[in-house]
Image (cartoon, rainbow, N blue to C red):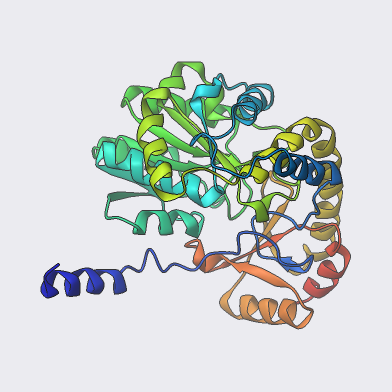
Amino acid sequence: MVQSTKALILEEHHQNTLLKASAPPLMAQTAHDLSADELFAPLDERMIASAVEALEAGQTHYVDVPGIAPLRAALADYLHTAFSANYAQSNVIVTAGMQESRFLTIQMIGDAFGRVAVPTVAHPGMRKALGVRALNVDLIAVDERALPTLDGLRATFTAGARLAYLESPARLTGAAYSAAEVTAIAELARAYDATIIWDQGLAPWTAAYTSLASVQENADRTVVIGETFPGMGLSSWFIGYIAAPEALIAPMQSQKQIMAICTSTPAQYAALEASKLYAEALPVQRDRLTKLRATVITEISAAHAVIPGEAVNVLALRLSPTTKASTLARLAAAGYSAADGADFGAPDVVRLTVSPETSAALAHSLQGA
C-alpha cells in the first residue's frame, strides 16, 4: 500500500465520528448498572448444565455459520408463537450478539440497496454499524416517543430510499408502535417496494406488541433482529438473531463467516435450553418489572417527566440540562450508572434499566433530584 493511501485511510478513520459514538454497555456489570440494554440477571442452572454437556460431548469446534439447526428452529418457532411471524429455520441466523445483528443487516443489506434511512434518535450501536463502512444515509424524523414518524418515513421513501432501519420498541424510551401504526408502515413499505430492518429486541418486555413481521404481505421485505431470549442472563454470552427473507441471508452469512465463522457453540446450546424455559420464565419477570416500574413512576412523577413507553424494562426521563446534570450526579453518588440520551441523539433524556434489585433505592435517589 502506498503511503499516501495509508495516510488517507487513517485520516478517514480518525474522522469517523459514527464509529466512535459512545454506546451503553452490552450487559449490566452489576445490579446497580442501569445503563445496559438488558437487566442484570443470573443464568439458570439448567442453561449452564446444557452448555457444560455440550462441551463434554465434544462441541468445542466451529458449527454451521448460521447457527446450530435446533436453535435456529427454536428461534423460528418463538418468532411465530410470540409475534405471528412465518420464518423457517433457513431464514434465521444466530449472531454473536445484538451488535453483530445490527452490523450485518445495516451493512450487507445496505450495500445491496446503496442507501439506508435511519431515525435521528436510535441506539448508538446503530451509528457504530453505519460508521464501519460508508453508506448513503437518509434521516427519519422522530416523535416525542423517539419513534420515527410516518411522515418522516414517507419523506425518505419519496426521496428515493428503499431500505429503512426502525426500532419498535424504541431503545431509548421503550415506546412501541400501535397495531394501526404497524399496518400503516407495512402499507408504506409495499407502496414504495421498500425493505424494513425491524429491531424488536425490547418487544418481550411489552404486554401487547405488534411486529412488522406479523404482516404476511410484507414477508419478503421485512428483516427482524433482536436479542436471543432476553432476561435469561445471556447478554454476556453475546447471542442474538436475524430473521430475513432467504434472498437476503446469503450475503450476511458470508460476511459472518469472514468475521467470526460462527457464534459461540456453548452459548448456542445455553440459548437452546433457554428456549425451553422462556415461555414460563418471561411472564414472571415481566409482571414483576411492570409492578416495579409503576412504583418508581408513582414515586418520582412529581419531580420528573417520564416518557411513556411499553417496554417495562426501561424508564426514560426528559430533563432540562440543569436537572439532567444533577440527576446523573445524584444517581452516580448512589452508585448507579445510567444511559445518557445524548448518545442516542436525545440530549434531554436519561434512560434507566428497571431492575428488581434496585428499584426502591432508585426511586429514593430520583425523588427531588
Residue under the point 28% across and 42% down: 111
Query: Which image quadrant: the N terminus?
Result: bottom left
Q: Nearer the viewer, residue 248 or 177?
A: 248
Residue under the point 35% across and 69% down: 17
Q: Is residue 12 above or below residue 326?
A: above
Left or right position of 322 against 233: left
Residue 334's quadrant in the figure?
Answer: bottom right
- From this viewpoint, which residue is outermost toward the top? 217
Q: Residue 113 at x, y = what percent?
A: 27, 37
Residue under the point 76% across and 83% down: 333
Q: Residue 250 at x, y = what percent?
A: 37, 31
Query: Which image quadrant: the C terminus?
Result: bottom right
Q: Is residue 24 above or below residue 201?
A: below
Q: Is residue 248 visible?
A: yes
Q: Nearer the viewer, residue 368 or 22?
A: 22
Q: Residue 101 at x, y = what percent?
A: 49, 44
Left or right position of 130 against 217: left
| Count of marks overlaid on the render | 0
Q: Nearer the viewer, residue 239 or 195?
A: 239
Q: Residue 230 at x, y = what percent?
A: 70, 44
Residue under the point 56% across and 65% down: 341
Residue 40's quadrant in the figure?
Answer: bottom right
Q: Is residue 204 visible?
A: no
